[in-house]
Amino acid sequence: MMRPKIAISVGDINGVGIEIALKSHKDIIQICKPIYFINSKLLSRAAKLLNSYIPPEFDIYECGDDFEIKPGEVSKKSGKFSFISFENALNFTAKGKADALVTLPINKESWKRAKIPYKGHTDALSSYFKRDAIMMLGCDELYVALFSDHIALKDVSKKIKFKSLKRFLLDFYTSTKFEKVGVLGFNPHASDNGTIGGKEEIEIKRAIKEVNNILNKPIFTGPLVPDAAFTPNSLKSTNRLIALYHDVGLAPLKALYFDRSINISLNLPIIRTSVDHGTAFDIAYQSKADNKSYIQSIKFAINSVKI
């Protein structure tokens, strides 16, 4: 069987991404053809710092400039390079030269210093494809999608409107075909029928009812009480969830399945997956990085490819 070709952006070079890529290569080369978006000089610098070697068949797509690697530091240069790596890998995949895109972690502050006009990968993907990318994280035991991802908490409430929720739920169903999905409430106790706030829950209920009518089946339920939705009994019933706010969904997910979860971009014309963690600057270039999420990201991308 032909191995799928996977474009891999290496993330922030001052973080753990390149260590993960190097230590995982011998395993993933058995199941796919990875292409790493980095330049040979920077790769040699990273391998030397890691006291590692560049493995055979480590195919690279030359991009970006050479510069000094500063492990664990926020840097304009590393931010610019991580975006160049991502942009080249994205273009490569969008043109059909790769079957899927897998991204290693970037640092948002470094992107800001480099004047990259996006908050992160999902924001950039939405802009590139002119459609709303949906961020979903998790594993088979639990997937959580985010209605709002990297925006401030104070801005979430005004984003929760019937029309945008309706579009989100329809796009989510079209992308996943999940048959039972819980939508978490926004206020504590999902507002207790309007006792604690409640205008957001009214919008959520309207959107759920309308979308279920359109789909002609009860796909979505809710709004569910967020602090009860992640209990073992609740997850036995509904383990595909939509959170209205980033931390409400991802804090319990990572507490339960941090070492197995991955990040998947939905509602896009390409397959894109990523690790569910950040650059881990505190352990960069110390040979301590865990590659489980990366391996799972690769496997999910491969399983999503139709060859």
Image (cartoon, rainbow, N blue to C red):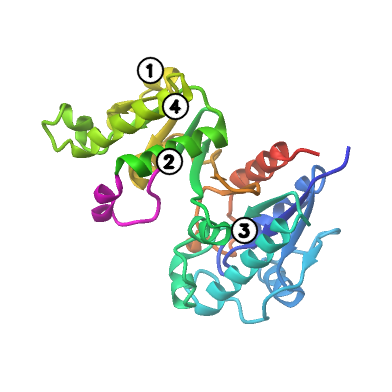
What's under tag 1, amino acid-wise?
A: Asn
The Cα atoms of the two marked residues, 2 and 1, are separated by 30 Å
Say which element carries label 4. helix
Q: Is residue 250 at all visible to an observer of this figure?
A: yes
Q: Residues within 10 Å of mark 2 (few under 14, many from 20)?
A: few
Callout in the foreground (1, 3): 1
Magenta residues (range): 147-160
Indicate the position of residue 239 as horizontal and vertical percent values: 45, 26
Residue 235, located in which quarter of the rendered image? top left
The Cα atoms of the two marked residues, 1 and 3, are separated by 38 Å
Q: Which residue is mark 4?
A: 214
Mark 4 touching mark 3, by CB under 8 A? Answer: no
Callout in the foreground (2, 1): 2
Of the numbered discs in the image, which one, if any, rests on residue 233?
A: 1
x 46%, y 20%: residue: 216
x 44%, y 63%: residue: 119
The Cα atoms of the two marked residues, 4 and 2, are separated by 11 Å
What's under tag 2, amino acid-wise?
A: Arg
Say which element carries label 1. helix
Of the numbered discs in the image, which one, if any, rests on residue 281?
A: none
- Horizontal arrangement in the rendering, residue 181 relative to residue 35 (left or right): left
Sequence-wise, the earlier of marks 4 and 1 is: 4
